[in-house]
Image (cartoon, grey):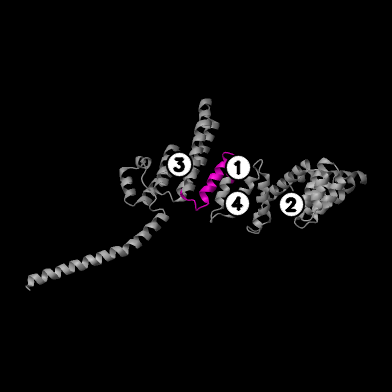
Amino acid sequence: MSIVTKLKSYSYRRLLLSLIILGGFGFVRIPIEMNTEKMLKEQGFRDWSPSMSAREQLTQASFVGSIGGFRSLIASIYDLRAHQAFRDKDWASVEKFRGVTTSLQPRFAKHWDLAAWDLAWNAYAYYRNKSEWAEDGVESWQMKNIMMPRYLEKGLEFAKQGAEWVPESYRLSMVVADIYSQKYNDPELASQWYLKSSQADDAPPYVFRAYATHLARCEGKEEKAYEVTSSLYRSTRFGTRALTLTVRRDMERLEDHIALSAANKMSLEQLESAALSNGSTYLDYAKLGMHLLEVKKDLKATLAVYREIVNDKNAPLFYSRKLLMLLARNPANQEQAYEALKKLLKRSPEIFRRQDLIEFTKLETSLGASKNNREK
């Protein structure tokens, strides 16, 4: 065999070996690349394609840069442009630039949050302030009825889209709930979004409290609201911080609503039977007490029922205040009730409502005047 033939044979073997190695390496890479692609999709690096609106708003250089892998840098540039537009009160540009940043980085919650805040709060407040100072009535009407609702709706839409893109975070669902609560005064929709937000793994405890608070404001949903508020009131999941003044007040108001509803619908015999049955709770006694007080107008019997409630360790402390307030209705018990109320107020001021404090002050004034008359 000639040297040339040997060289050619050696070259063919090297080529064949190289092809085998490349092919083997290719097969090894397939599962690695599939796992890498899956990870990139999960992290949001494969979820963006340039829409026509984004393409129109980007400069040619920015568009090419975003396609070439510089999305984060381009988004940061437009974030700065949005901030400058905000400082200039150029709300149309703010909306446009925020739209670019959210389009470039849809999995970055901060961009959605800033967009919602700039439009639903900042632009809204800007036009509200201008409408109040506008001398032209037509201009004022346009700002109140066109510009303010427009930017409020735009901000809400940004927050909702962000919640769809970043569902694992509580933040954007809470922003939607805040808008429904603070801007639209819609506790039902707000409660729905607070509930959604509270179910996220990173949701702080106050989001669930916000859900309970707004649900308690929904007319016709008192039973469900009481179930939620009661569980929050008694649960150790959130610690003592869960017992905010709002939770305490909602608990009392909802129990009063339930008790009064039962007092008006049920007979005395039915209420007595429920209160005296095995497994009854202090709330069954509260229903009976409400019937005796509001329907039968029997103060003496009502006091006896409320004493039973106060002796129940599961009953909230505000029933002690209720009992003492009822005792104070009888002139013969006023001094005793006043002294007990004063001690309770010093120990637990959080269970006293504004109206209770007014009644307490009246009682104090009345007893003081009576004492002065006796001394004379």
Kindly identify which numbered label has been placed on residue 208: 4
CA separation in Å, label 4 and label 1: 14 Å
The residue stretch that appears in magenta: 165-191
Q: Which residue is mark 2?
A: 349
CA separation in Å, label 3 and label 4: 33 Å
Q: Name the front one of labels 3 and 4.
A: 4
Report the number of numbered marks.
Answer: 4
Q: Name the front one of labels 3 and 1.
A: 1
Q: Amino acid at mark 3?
A: Phe
**Quick check: is 305 in the magenta stretch?**
no
- Which image quarter holds the N terminus? bottom left
Q: Which residue is mark 3?
A: 86
Quadrant of the image occupied by residue 257: top right
Left or right: residue 4 versus residue 146 is left
Q: Name the front one of labels 1 and 2.
A: 1
Query: Of helix, strand and loop, which mostly describes the magenta segment?
Result: helix
